[in-house]
Amino acid sequence: MTHVLIIDDEPTICWALSEALADEGFSVSVAGSAEEGLWSAEQRRPDIVLTDVRLPGADGLSVLRHFQNVDAALPVIVMTAFGSLEIAVEAVAAGAFDYLVKPFDLQDAVTLVQQAQTALQQRGTDTAENVSASQDEASLLVGDSPNMQAVFRKIAMVASQDVPVLVTGESGTGKELVAQALHLFSGRKQGAFVPVCVPAMNEGLIESELFGHAGGAFTGATQARRGLLQQASGGTAFLDEIGDVALAMQVKLLRVLEEKKVTPVGSNQAVAADFRLVAATNRNLEDMVRQKSFREDLYYRLSTFRIDLPPLRERGDDVILLAKHFLNRFSNATRYQFAPETLDELRSRKWHGNVRELRNAVEHAAILSRSGTILPSALPSPVLPSGSAASPTGDLAGVVNQWLQSREGKNEPGLLNQFMETIEPILFQHALEVSGGNRSEAAQLLGIHRQTLREKLRRYDMDPSGD
């Protein structure tokens, strides 16, 4: 019977996992600390280990390293609710069988243990390649939310595997940062990281920029030049906005990926271009394949492994974590702190520009703030959704929420009347401007009687004539 050791200081986690694994025919031992887990392993050697990262005393990564030193073939599954990209990569690099993000579905955990059981007879004794990065490199991506933890897990699992990766997500979610992380934690770290945004290139020179050219290949090509893909040889090429690449160029890119060679413009001699490809897009490539605007064979080649980045609005309090992170990185950031109401404002925004918009907003606010406290008024106006001149319901809801937040703690009655007194003068002024000062037309536009409009204008001191 396969024996599983669970090391976690949360009794409910231990109990739930024990019951689920026992139902599947595993024998189970539990421990509440690293030291207790190591002692338990001495009493009965486990076949599979599940360990939390955060434990009393020594941490779960120390447990992982201990078991790897004792038996490198022992599958160790690391669990965490507070992992960073660095921890995820370190766990996998140290030989973890997999990385399980809390909260997780029990069936997913059971399936993972069953996969480890199947791998026991097949797994060799070689430990994973020791991949490390500096603290600055590891902090490229920041997030505590479950969906970002899932992203970290995927990066950790695929970074050392020399296969193409497709990164998808809205504009501003950090797709290039993911590509950089994949490069930094890969065996190609010593090579070049070459970012390429094909749609931003001069249309007539795209092929020359990517593949290089021979001397005299065209007017102005006085000498041979290596292309960007050849410059990435031995490292990583990051092709951004891959969904915007023309069909003719897609054919040539596919050939390069298949052959690992490029042919410079004006030359008949192919040259080696052994790079790892990471591609990114904010478009739906599946729809494009169906519409015949993106090659199906290139799509499948690019999406060997896929990482989907969540928009910032789906990352919960990562907004605050990121805001503080950007503030700390900003020049003289130690002078500043966010007022509580500013943190509330940051949480309430939709962040249609995602992480990029948040970073710009924080830096903008820090520049404007003359005291040590950043107030909501220092933040720039929210960015509207791409492709829309306005978002009436979203904008209005944001304004109303800001007004309500400004009244926090004021629970006196008459909330509706107070709100109407705030908004009515704005509507009346607009109606008068649209009607050229004609009150009858303004009243008709507002849907109220002319006399009602007259009375309200007097009430709000908006009737200089007094009639």
Image (cartoon, rainbow, N blue to C red):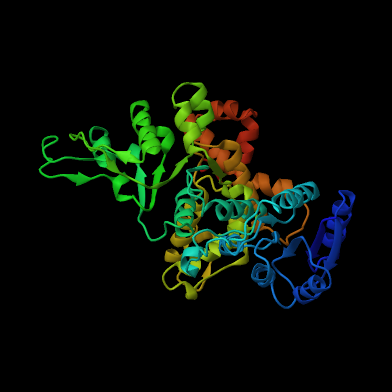
Please state which of residues 375 and 211 is positioned toward the viewer in this rendering.
Answer: 211
Instruction: State the image coordinates of residue 228 (x, y, percent, origin top left).
Output: 29, 46
Is 252 left or right of 220, judged from the image as shown? right
Can you say whether 295 is above or below 459 in the image? Answer: above
Question: Which residue lies at the image location 57% right of the left edge and 56% below the top edge?
Answer: 156
Can you say whether 54 is above or below 104 in the image? Answer: below
Q: Is residue 215 visible?
A: yes
Question: Which residue lies at the image location 72% right of the left edge and 52% below the top edge?
Answer: 116
Locate the N terminus and report the quarter of the image it occupies: bottom right
Count of numbered circles in the view: 0
Instruction: State the image coordinates of residue 389 (x, y, percent, origin top left).
Output: 47, 35
Please state which of residues 255 and 308 is positioned toward the viewer in this rendering.
Answer: 255
Instruction: State the image coordinates of residue 334 (x, y, percent, origin top left).
Output: 49, 75
Can you say whether 106 is above or below 261 in the image? Answer: below
Please state which of residues 374 and 218 is positioned toward the viewer in this rendering.
Answer: 218
Instruction: State the image coordinates of residue 397 (x, y, percent, origin top left).
Output: 63, 43
Q: Is residue 437 visible?
A: no
Is 305 left or right of 38, judged from the image as shown? left
Question: Which residue lies at the image location 27% right of the left edge and 33% below the top edge?
Answer: 203
Locate the C terminus and report the quarter of the image it occupies: top right
Is 212 left or right of 215, judged from the image as shown? right
Is 172 left or right of 225, judged from the image as shown? right
Please state which of residues 2 and 238 is positioned toward the viewer in this rendering.
Answer: 2
Q: Which residue sits furthest top?
A: 291
